[in-house]
Image (tube, rainbow, N blue to C red):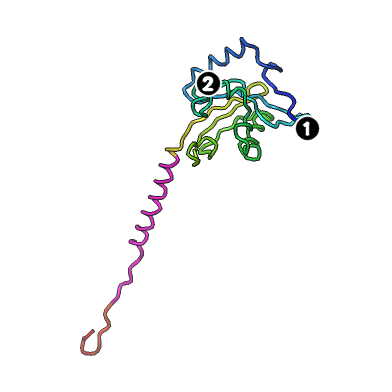
Amino acid sequence: SGMRTVDSAEGGALSAPAGDAVRIDIEALFDPFVLMSAVRDDEGRIVDFGYLAANAAACADLGLTRGKLLASTLLELNPGAGDRTFFKRLVGVVETGEPLTLEDFESSAAAADGGWRYYDASATRIGVGVGLAWWDVTLRYQRDRTAARSEAELRGILDALLDPFEVLAPVRDARGRI
């Protein structure tokens, strides 16, 4: 079964006026934000998310033009995401209406250098789709991990210094010699 339907808040494609209104509102946000619509298979299962709107910060963070991003789906841009927790949790947002907040979420997809990036993300159901905002917290994550390592090292040093010392008393013979 292939991809068949793309949901939107109006039950079909966003009309130009509604699309323009959404784009104007999200452009005011400093942080990356996208509005995605559920893509369903013949059985009605969510199999992907299509991008309906994105602000300039999202396009810049993803390194894509708005046209390229809006012509793509989440899994086209991140093929491995379908088997990962993040995709499943986005599906849960649409199916249950429960908002999602992630901290220090690990992603290699956005790292141009092939390394890992860390994000805080917030997703909420909007109509039958999902609004997703995210913040790159890689520097905070690295700083926190460095601080934790330094703290653990310092604790080890202090524990070693504070270990009880054995006090030795001299043993003397009958004449008082040690």
Q: SS of the residue at dot 2? A: loop
Between 61 and 170, the one nearer to me in the picture? 61
Q: SS of the residue at dot 1? A: loop
**Residue at the image position 35 percent from the left and 66 percent from the top:** 164
Quarter of the rendering containing residue 157: bottom left
Q: Which residue is mark 2?
A: 55
Which marked residue is nearer to the observer: mark 2 or mark 1? 1
Q: Position of residue 86 (x, y in %)?
A: 61, 36
The amino acid type of the residue labelled 2 equals Asn
**Residue at the image position 42 percent from the left and 48 percent from the top:** 148
Vertical placement of 95 versus 150: above or below?
A: above
Q: Position of residue 121 (x, y in %)?
A: 54, 32
How many marks the image carries: the answer is: 2
Between 14 and 109, the one nearer to me in the picture? 109
Between 74 and 67, the one nearer to me in the picture? 67
Please identify the quadrant where the N terminus is shown: top right
**Residue at the image position 40 percent from the left and 46 percent from the top:** 146
The magenta stretch is 141-168
**Residue at the image position 62 percent from the left and 30 percent from the top:** 74
**156 in magenta:** yes
- Horizontally, is 122 left or right of 142 in the view? right
Q: Which residue is mark 1?
A: 1
Count neighbours of disc 2 (C-alpha within 10 A) and say few if under 14, some if 14 to 19, many if 20 or more: many
The amino acid type of the residue labelled 1 equals Ser
